[in-house]
Image (spheres, grey):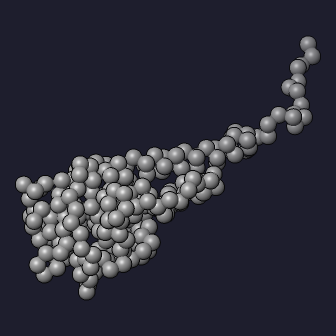
Amino acid sequence: MPSTLPPLDDGSGPSRDPRGGSRRDRRLRWLVVPAIVLIAIILVRAFLISPYAIPTGSMEPTLQVGDRILVSRLASPQDLERGDVIVFDASAAFHLDEGTPGLLRRVMDTVGSVVGEGADTDYVKRLIGLPGDRVRCCAVHGRITVNGAAVDEPYLYPGDAPSTTTFDVTLPADRYWVMGDHRSVSADSRSHLGAPGGGMIPGEDVIGQVWVRYWPPDRVGTLTPVPLSAIPRNGQ
């Protein structure tokens, strides 16, 4: 009986890589793997830990321009304490109207968020007042008081006064008072006293608590919270 020969390869089928699999399959793998990694980074950033770069000197000397930090999203605003350093979305509380971003801008913000370049409206400040607190400035020796107790602030920029702006605010439920450590250059809650909301930060706008500085190498380490002096909570 005549033997049956296999059909000749006329080149119409998918080309084969000598290491196994078609070249098309290998190209797909090169696309799928980075996509999976990118999605994982975005999910981690959205729900667990977010990287940020410090763009201004408003938190000096604690955080300096160019420092890179990781922010924990695990704690709820109710878990925060006075003296914690937080990141929050200031667009609503500080009335930073940037209009509706276009598609290109949204793509750039997404890419920037992956590498630690947060949105321009993401601010980093120190938490001074919690819901129910009465925060005033200035008491004897120019110090800030919370619920009538003067607080020590060892983190202040050398030579800065606790505040050159006088204020007396009582925070309603789910509102927070924030200030930068470099008080003389910080645009914080004090800068919006006369605006709707009075510069108070809604809990829903708190992104997370600053956890660790991972750059530069000589400043790597956790950001140890600096609790304010023993203060009666909510005026009690």
In this rendering, does residue 162 appear at all? yes
Q: Residue at x 64, y 44 (%)?
A: 29
Q: Position of residue 43 (x, y in %)?
A: 46, 46
On the picture, is 192 further left or further right than 103?
left
Quadrant of the rendered structure where residue 122 is?
bottom left
Q: Report the front residue among 122 and 173.
A: 173
Q: Residue furthest left?
A: 236
Q: Position of residue 63 (x, y in %)?
A: 34, 73
Q: Residue furthest bottom?
A: 159
On the picture, is 47 further left or further right than 229?
right
Above or below residue 158? Residue 85 is: above
Q: Residue at x 64, y 48 (%)?
A: 30
Q: Position of residue 109 (x, y in %)?
A: 55, 57
Q: Position of residue 236 (x, y in %)?
A: 7, 54
Q: Residue at x 89, y 31 (%)?
A: 8
Where the N terminus falls, by quadrant? top right
Q: Report the front residue among 25 and 190.
A: 190
Q: How many marks?
A: 0
Q: Report the front residue among 136 and 85.
A: 136
On the picture, is 92 further left or further right than 143?
right
Quadrant of the rendered structure where residue 52 is?
bottom left
Above or below residue 127? Residue 205 is: above
Q: Residue furthest top?
A: 1
Q: Residue at x 92, y 16 (%)?
A: 2
In this rendering, does residue 71 appear at all? no
Quadrant of the rendered structure where residue 145 is?
bottom left
